[in-house]
Amino acid sequence: MSQPPSSSIADGAVPPTLLDLRGLRVFVAGHRGLVGAAIMRRLASEDCELVTDATGTDLRRQEATERLIAGLKPDVVVVAAARVGGIYANSTWPASFIYDNLAIAMNVIQAARLSGVRKLLNLGSSCVYPREAPQPIPEEALLTGPLEPTNEWYAIAKIAAIRLCDAYRLQHGCDFVSVMPTNLFGPGDNYDPESSHVPAALIRRFHEAKRRGDPTVTVWGTGQPRREFMYVDDLADAAVFVLKHWSAPGIVNVGVGHDITIAAFARLVADTVGYAGDLVFDPSRPDGMPRKLLDGRRLEALGWRPRTDLADGLARAYADFLAGGARGPGRPLD
Ligand code: GDP
């Protein structure tokens, strides 16, 4: 699958290339997930060799993961494998979210070091930041306060992965970097009503309500929280940009620079799907973080910009849903 190369670099201001991907072997752990698949699509337009795990290795198993990566001999590793889920999944399966994500990060990062990879990109999430972080959230807000309880299990594992990369850089000189994307959506999302994030959940709910002719659709929470949404192919473009042009300890935010209330977002999804009924809010469901807007100036200063407008991205995501691109339910394995 080939896509046109990125046009996201502003005004031709290209920063120095720290890693030339040409001819390198790149392994994307989690290549079938929302993020991993988008990164595979983006890497297809680079002159690198994509190596994949044909055997479906359980990355929570240390020896198996080390064997896999030693065998693939990648030059570059992208850690896009994770146990992910929305607000309900996170609070319902805390052990799966913390254990699976800690194990995956630990095993892949250690295996990458052992096999001598040249660069590793660790994917985190905006939920690593404290609940009361200043908005827009700067990278410096990491580890400055208590986390949002509805996703703290996932967040703790993701923070541990960031600090693992930093520790490996310090002790072993590894070029391991971490990016923190904002809330993502797009082709191949998980549309399971219980474990999905809000974009996929609402695409499905509005679609089904339209088909049945329901007069109302229920949206979780008060509708007042604010979220920043990014089309996943923009994140994939940022990931490749970071691989090439960024090398430093700590983290880099990847966002779009503006947010929207859940109520307004829900109306936009309804319009995308062509649902004309009313929205009903269910405040018995948790709102989660009141607001999550990333400060993206660090990446912007290097010249990277997202390019997909929210309405366009939602239209593409809905087209993918209609075409049957949805992933499985994404429930805990055990
Ligand atoms: P979060 O950013 O970690 O809170 O992830 P989510 O995507 O799960 O939720 C974002 C916001 O959307 C929260 O305030 C939810 O309460 C709200 N929301 C509204 N309807 C839904 C829904 O059907 N599913 C999910 N997951 N969230 C919803």
Image (spheres, grey):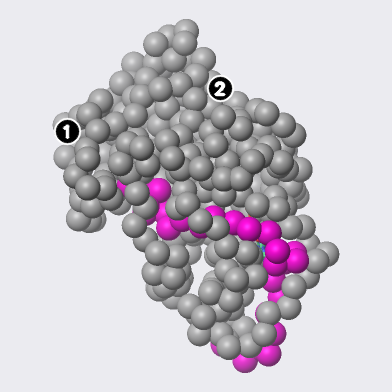
Pointer 1: what residue? 22
Q: Does residue 57 appear in this view?
A: no
Q: Residues within 10 Å of mark 2 (few under 14, many from 20)?
A: some
Pointer 2: what residue? 163
In this image, 17 relative to 128: left or right?
Answer: left
Query: Which amino acid type is shown beneath numbered disc 2?
Result: Arg
Nearer to me, 59 or 213: 213
Residue 96 magenta-drawn?
A: no
Nearer to me, 118 or 329: 118
Q: Residue at x 34, y 57 (%)?
A: 307
Query: Which amino acid type is shown beneath numbered disc 1?
Result: Arg
Residue 86 location, x and y as percent? 64, 54
Q: Residue at x 58, y 88 (%)?
A: 276
Q: Residue at x 61, y 45 (%)?
A: 135
Q: Which mark is residue 266?
A: none
Does dot 1 land on a helix, a strand or a loop?
Answer: loop
Q: Earlier in the sequence, mark 2 or mark 1?
A: 1
Discs 2/1, front: 2
Q: Does residue 284 appear in this view?
A: yes
Name the quadrant containing residue 143.
top right
Image quarter in which the N terminus is found: bottom left
Magenta part of the protein: which range?
Answer: 211-237
Name the quadrant containing residue 193.
bottom right
Where ligand 1 lies, by image quadrant? bottom right
Residue 161 location, x and y as percent? 55, 27
- Farthest-out residue, top: 171
Q: Residues within 10 Å of mark 1 (few under 14, many from 20)?
A: few
Does dot 2 land on a helix, a strand or a loop?
Answer: helix
Whole-angstrom CA distance, mark 2 to mark 1, is: 29 Å
